[in-house]
Amino acid sequence: MSLNKTLVDMNYLLKEAPREQHFITGAQAMAEAVKRASCDMAIAYPITPQSEVMHLVGDIYAQGHIKEYYRAEEELGTMSAIAGAARGGVRMFTATSGPGLLRGLEAIVSWPGHRIPCVLGVLTRVVNAPLSIQPDNIEMAYLMHSGIVMLHAENQQDTFDMTLAAFAITEKVDVYIPVSVSTEGFFVTHAKGYVDMMSDELAFTECDPYKAPVPAMDNEVPPARIQRDAPVQKSNFMSYLIHSVWQQEIWDCNKRAMKYIYEYLDGPIEVTNPNAKVMLVASGCAAAQAREANRYAEEEGLDVGFVKVRAIRPFPTDELNAALAGAECVIVPEHNIIGWLSKEVKAAIPNGGIVVEGPRVYGGMTLPVELIMTEIYDALGMDSLVLQA
Amino acid sequence: MSLNYMIPASKFKRYLPKDYVELVDYGPFGKEYSEVGTKNMGKYKELVEEHPMCSGCWMAYYIKIIFAALPNPEDTVTIGTAGCGRLAISQAAVPFIYGNYGDQNAMASGITRAFRLRFPDKQKDVITIAGDGGMMDIGFSMTMHAWFRGEKFTTIMLDNEVYGNTGGQESGMSVRGAVLKMSPKGKNFGKMPAMQLAITAGCVYVVKMSPTNINKAAKAIRRAIFAARELGPTFIHAYTSCNIEYSIPTPDVFRDAKEKEKGRFAFEEFMTDEAKELFTVVEAKKKKKVS
Amino acid sequence: MSKKITVGPVGYMPQSAPSMGVELSPEGKALLYGNIVEEEEAMRDAAKALLTMDNPTIFPGPMVLWDWKEDVAEKSGAILDLASEIPGCKIIPMPDYRPKYPKIDVKAEINPNHPNLTILDNKIKACVFIGVHCHYANLTLRMIRAGTACYTVAMCAEMGHEEAMASIRDVHAADVLRFRDIIIEVRNELGIEYTTTMPPENPSLPKEDWGSLTPSDYGEYRSLIMSKKGEHVTAVE
């Protein structure tokens, strides 16, 4: 690193290093995390609303915090170049959103199988058509079955901490698959919030490409005759079997990431009032609104609890089961039309019938706390219209 | 020193399979080009031996030339994509990356930059080898943009004028009128001007050829690699017929390559002034060494 | 202690050990049949398997086969010391990770894309993997558990392997030698008399018998030695 930084491990960086409060946007928070990550290289492609993240990452490249940066031709080119560079043994970052994520998806879904460690920012946006640039996190649904580790940030502080932690998690020998950090476009990326940050003279220990479950493709590490991603497309049982165990390995890596989510981020969920009759379960921006609804409910003396889901993959099935064991109704507010989180929660608990699928907003609509309150009143058998009036 | 990663631990040498021991003892790694190279093919342990290509495959023959021509095989990474070529390339004793469809030049952009970051004082050659479909159709944007960006690696297109591996469909490099799968009434546009595109996009050294002369083919490959190290992107457009899809009887494959050499694959070489200067220096050095 | 991970064959479609709830052991501990135990306990069980089961074999991987790092010489020496104390032990290397084309020589090597071919052909019932990158080790160990009856020991320089019957983590040369000592100890306990013997060298290595060569041995260069029209070759030199 050209700037004289003090390199420290992630535990020190996240938990012990003194922090100062700043008032910054989510996009700035993500870039500030990259600044402290000893990231070697970032590849950018413009799209709204993530473009600001990659502009800012360009700025920190110009300031010398990262070593290499360029604007690629489009997202498939970006994501493919990341797969090349990561094989060459450097620490990588990029960010995208909505349609960009889908354009790069062919490369992205192959990253885990190729054992590519990198951090992907996903600043959520509507998927066309009709064309829109507004927040809506439906693209996360497409990532959920790719094998990639997925974190979902509620606010600017989460965006900062999760992005930093992601750099450590992705390079763990028993993980070594990409980690994505999603947060809602505009609502978080363009809004300012308080973020406690450590000094930017500190940075995460540099990447060691030889502490890896696969050889770096750099002609420095054996074997010589190597193709890391073996061609196994022959039509015989052995080819099928190697592909099956390979796929299993990716999901095992995903599973192994959980212990690091505990280590760096205090676990995959945060629970308030776990034994309540009505539980709110939400992630990302919806969690901020659900948190607020929970506060309203508390003020009104209602028996309501709240679970914020930080990790979408690996999905916290055991943790949710413990937190929702006493619930009679589970409300899952979301920023997308298909309700990917409510479906996950439904499938995770034995009594999925208690899950209320909603409220949901999409297409850029905001999620008023009142929508969540209405569901709470319904669940408690109260006449919501009268109460709200 | 990179060579270490292919030298057996002394205690284990007698436990390694013969193939690997021979590769180290009699292979081209760490040797002068004059001792190995295309001129000595058959006399040393080559990097590509067994491969699953069709009998009479001109592409397999050219791939053997590529690997025999490498100036620095122990510090070379090859990148390819779906297609017949990678069936042979993946058998070579050189690291090979097989990514997604047509992504080879984007992948190479990333890894070339990574190498320059990590090994500023060491030369590591990156070569993408893909077919006409992978380079000019599905990978077109990534191929062109890598050239526009001036990425310093070598691109080799194995042009068999058809999608051979998927069963003989029309490609952008098929000739006008060719009746192929997906062009049942004949292709209604001509070959894409790959060489001109490469020159326009900023390649510093571009060759179009039908590789009927092994040493001439090797010279072009080596020039492309030398120029990519110092100056910028380089491109070789080589005719590597598909004798299956174009029904060329095996004994006639060479004759067909010769014919193409007189026609649309007549030898053409483009180089910038800087490249020309570089070759004068590099090739003079070589001659001096030999004498 | 219930065994979570046992000697196979576990069947057509193996379930991965992590998906069965097995977790990697913390530093200083080992895994034995999927359970976290003291290293010595795992090593003793592994030693017993290697001493009592048929055709014990050590599979060294690329990281110990090639001289790429300073510690390789020491580690490779230790591995040979270990092998020399196991009666009838063979060394079959895993030199790289590419599937073998056109056909693997199962007496000479093992490959992570089809490891069971080597295990089955050589009737190996106990083996040690060392120096293999973790990704390929996990694939290999799982495929062996799926389709063969082989006790697997993983000696890993990193965090170990859930799929192995015995998994030792953070292995350096000294740990290999400690395992060798445990082998000797267990061997004496079992009353097996043995004098230290080096494993046989790779069977693919012996010199070719040039006298029995036929033109077909020359593959694609065959045409170079074929007789010309009208020429009669009666003997091959």
Image: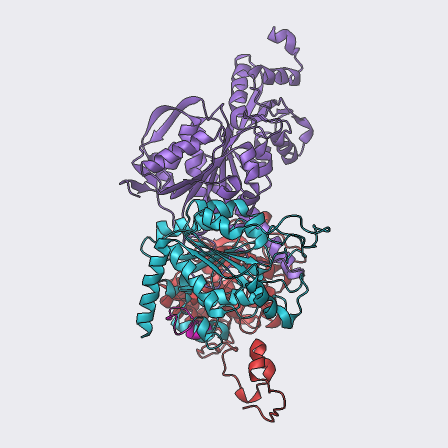
Chain colours: A purple, B cyan, C red
Residue A287, x across and y down, in percent = 53, 25
Q: Position of residue C74 (x, y in %)?
A: 36, 67
* Rendered position, B31 above or below B130: below
In the orientation shown, which residue stands out farthest toward the left? A4
Camera-side residue: C18 or A85? A85
Please determine whether, in this image, residue A355 is positioned above or below residue A375.
below
Q: Identify the residue at horizontal 44%, vertical 78% (top origin).
A: C196
User: Which residue is drawn at the image coordinates 40% and 43% (left, top)?
Assistant: A41
- Along the line of sight, which residue is nearer the eye, C109 or B284? B284
Q: Is residue B35 magenta?
A: yes
Q: Position of residue A22 (x, y in %)?
A: 35, 24
Quarter of the figure with residue B119: bottom left
Count of residue discs: 0
- Locate residue A33: give its quadrant: top left
A369 versus C198 height, above or below: above
Residue visible at 43% across and 65% down? Answer: B219
Magenta span: B23-36
The answer to if A299 sits in the magenta stretch is no
Q: Is residue C99 above or below residue B136?
A: below
